Image (spheres, coloured by chain):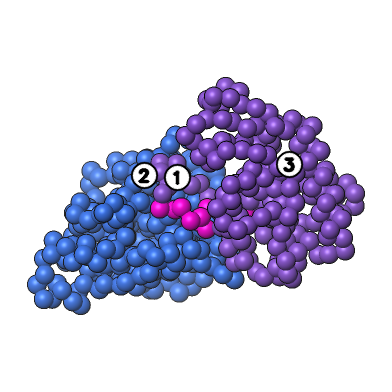
Chain colours: A purple, B blue
Amino acid sequence: MSDFPAISTQEILSPTGIEEAITFLAEEIATRCEGENVAFIGIFTRGVTLATRVAAVLAERGIQYPVGTLDISLYRDDFDNRGSDLPRLESSDVPFAIDGSRVIIFDEVIFTGRTIRAALDGLMDYGRPAKIELAVLVDRGHREIPIQPDYVGKKVETIFDDYVKVRFTEDDSKEGVFLVKEKGGTE
Amino acid sequence: MSELKPRKDLLDIESLTLDEIEYVLENAVPFKQLFQRSVKKVPTLRGKTVLNLFYEPSTRTSSSFEVAANRMSADVTNFSVSASSVVKGESLLDTIETLQAMRSDYIVIRHQAAGVPGIVAQHTRASVLNAGDGYHAHPTQALLDAMTFREVYPDFRGRKVVIVGDVLHSRVARSTSTLFNKLGIEVGVLGPGSLIPEGRHGFMQRFGSWDEVFDWKPDAVYLLRVQMERQEGQFFPSVSEYHKMYGMHSTRVQRMRELGCYLMHPGPVNRGVEITDEAMGYEKSLISTQVENGIAVRMAVLHWLKPETQLD
């Protein structure tokens, strides 16, 4: 993996593993949300891809859920620490009323939980869902705030300084989940 | 796109790189989409303070900055200087000293003298946003104009805009034409000979009449406000003469309609001078869009600039 300069890079989910995890998420959601008014919200960038893929699996089984998108940049708690990597905003698109519906937020990895904290704030500015849940492809632990996912594709043991990189062909022109060990880094 | 260097101040258009211009204009689009929500506010600048420092009267620009700052959850203080310390004889540097002590994070400044925002920027850790200085620059106006033009023409490169009126006294004309030129939009000018600067803006094509303008087939006509307050000398014989020669009225609107040409104006409008009531109702007028985009662009600029106020 030449694009991750690191001590070691280990594949934790292969393309097939991702597919199985997505099917698992879809089945869990279908079982637990049966008969309810459900909407998906993907967090840019790969949360959107994850939500779209799960929705596609469900659509094949005749279950249609709308997918909206959310850019949480404007809700982050680390705006003052932005460096030269200036945030490029995406257009959030929630083309349905979320009031009263069961909204499932999608992100590819949950780590500290701060992104989801920002997403909750951002989502509430669109309305008042009856219930909000969280689906992730990978839970890598090390929460800094009390937020837990409701649907998890795969749980991975990591140390804080590791990176967990999810790569989707739609966004990255390759597919896989990788555990990257690089001392001193944080993500 | 190459990595952008953090920038503290926005003083003019000339010093902006194309990457920076694209960055702000692209980020302004999601900001504008927030206006469709019932909650139009985001918490990004919570706890930050924006000082609106206007040495010249302004309602539109100062309230546009105020709305932009409010929608980002910043606290805004309006400091109308003509009404206070200047009258009491405070010097500019003393005022800056006072502002520094107030620990504002962003200072929005309009001043009748060119270069004042630059001087303030050198003496404060706050980010300085030039809201118009003398005949020099009005960068956020140029950015909102570019955003508006690009919305109606996503294929903006190679398109043509003619700026009509008092180009000489207009910081809007200066900043907007500079920005349009950087973006590859062709710029022409029409106006009384006494109000078209010699030598400056060599890239602009000069026209002698509306007929010449329409033969050029512009994609937008940008009318400037006739700035009665800046006419120390007499640059044209009379208002009615100006209106006849350069104003926008029904016959010219019809020519624009045939060309599919859009109408822009930075406001406020002098009805009956540069534009008639009837022409104000032209279906391809972008004047209200410019106002709305002004808020989005100013939010994008506040989001982009990085004050050095957290250092101490």
Disc 2 designates what residue? B6
Relative image position of residue B288 (x, y in whole percent): 49, 67
For the residue labelled by badge 3, is the local secondary structure a helix, a strand or a loop? strand
Extent of the magenta region:
A70-80
Relative image position of residue B172 (x, y in whole percent): 33, 57
Mark yes or no: residue B81 visible.
yes
Q: Is there CB contact under 8 Å for labels 2 and 1?
A: yes
Disc 1 designates what residue? A86
Q: Earlier in the sequence, mark 1 or mark 3?
A: 1
Q: Is residue B137 left or right of residue B187?
A: left
- Whether labels 1 and 3 share one chain: yes
Q: Is there CB contact under 8 Å for labels 1 and 3?
A: no
What is the chain identity of the residue bearing mark 3? A
At horizontal 42% and vertical 47% (from top left) the residue drawn is A82
Relative image position of residue A70 (x, y in whole percent): 62, 54
Is A5 magenta? The answer is: no
Q: CA distance from mark 1 to mark 3?
A: 31 Å
Mark 1 against mark 3, which lies toward the viewer? 3
Q: Looking at the rendering, which quadrant does residue A23 occupy?
A: top right
The kind of residue tagged 1 is: Leu
Q: CA distance from mark 2 to mark 3?
A: 38 Å
User: Which of these two is toward me, A143 or B109?
Assistant: A143
Query: Which residue is the extreme one toward the top?
Result: A2
For label 2, count other residues whose C-alpha is less than 10 Å away and answer few (under 14), some (14-19) or many (20+).
Answer: some
Q: Looking at the rendering, which quadrant does residue B138 occupy?
A: bottom left
Disc 3 designates what residue? A154
